[in-house]
Structures are given as C-alpha cells and as structure tokens.
Image (tube, rainbow, N blue to C red):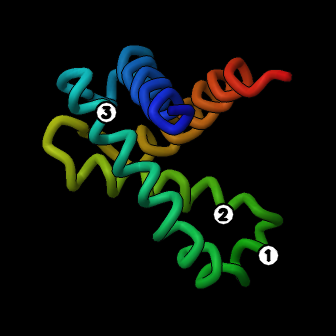
Amino acid sequence: MMLIVVWILNAVALLAVAYLLPGILVASFGSAMIAALVLGLLNALVKPILILLTLPITIVTLGLFLLVLNALVFWFAGSVLKGFQVEGFWWAVLGAILYSIISTFFSSLIFQS
C-alpha cells in the first residue's frame, strides 16, 4: 500500500515540476503516473550501472557528476515517453534537482515517526 502512495506522490511531484518549469511538459495525471513509474524503474535498474561505469569521473568531480547522471536519466525518460517531455539538457538538470527536492519532501511527510 505504501508503495502506491509513494508512486502517486512522485507523480504529483512530477506535475509540480512541470508546473514550475516551462521546459518540462506533462500531458495529464496518467502521463505523470507512467513517467513516475519509468523514472523509478530507471533509477532502480539503470542508474546503479551508470554510477559504476562513471565512478572515476564521479570521484574526480567529488560527486558532482551524479547531478549529470540524474539529469541524463530524467532527460531519457522524457525522450521515450509520449506524455512527458523535457526540452533540453539544462531543463533536465533543473527538473531532476527540483523533482528530487519535492519528492524527498513528500517522502519525509509520509515516513515521519
């Protein structure tokens, strides 16, 4: 049950990002749900492999390259989904940062003890 709540809140966070940033477009709540699911799967399955492959540059940049990886995953999700669109790399950087902040805020509201 908690997984579904987190999924819905991530979709709401994605809608908030699309509302705040003009370079990110989400067609509907259903599109936001699918995009949140795809982003979650990409972050769980693909991102650890990318982190491992880019570990030397991540160490050299003291972890700042992870922002680039987040943006690339966000941009890739926007390019493969029809109802979710990211206009460019810099919009992906801003969108990924804002999406992380908003979804972390929502998660902290749910998982408070």
Element type at mark 2 = helix
Residue type at the position of mark 2: Phe
Q: Which mark is residue 37?
A: none
Which marked residue is nearer to the observer: mark 3 or mark 2? 3
Residue projecting furthest to the front:
1
Is there CB contact under 8 Å for labels 2 and 1? yes
Residue 12: x and y in percent read: 43, 21
Mark 1 vs mark 3: which is more N-terminal?
3
Residue 19: x and y in percent read: 37, 15
* Residue lying at 22% horizontally and 32% vertically, measured from the top left: 31
User: The C terminus is located in which quarter?
Assistant: top right
Could you give the CA–CA distance between mark 1 and mark 3, rounded to whole angstroms? 36 Å
Element type at mark 1 = helix
User: For mark 3, what is the residue?
Assistant: 33
Whether 18 is drawn above or below 81: the answer is above
* Residue lying at 66% horizontally and 28% vertically, measured from the top left: 107
In the rendered structure, the answer to whether residue 17 lies left or right of residue 26 reads right
Q: Which mark is residue 60?
A: 1
Residue type at the position of mark 1: Val
Whether 2 is drawn above or below 16: the answer is below
| Quarter location, residue 51 | bottom right
Element type at mark 3 = helix
* Residue lying at 41% horizontally and 49% vertically, measured from the top left: 39
Could you give the CA–CA distance between mark 2 and mark 1, rounded to whole angstroms? 9 Å
User: For mark 2, what is the residue?
Assistant: 65
Mark 3 vs mark 2: which is more N-terminal?
3
Residue type at the position of mark 3: Met
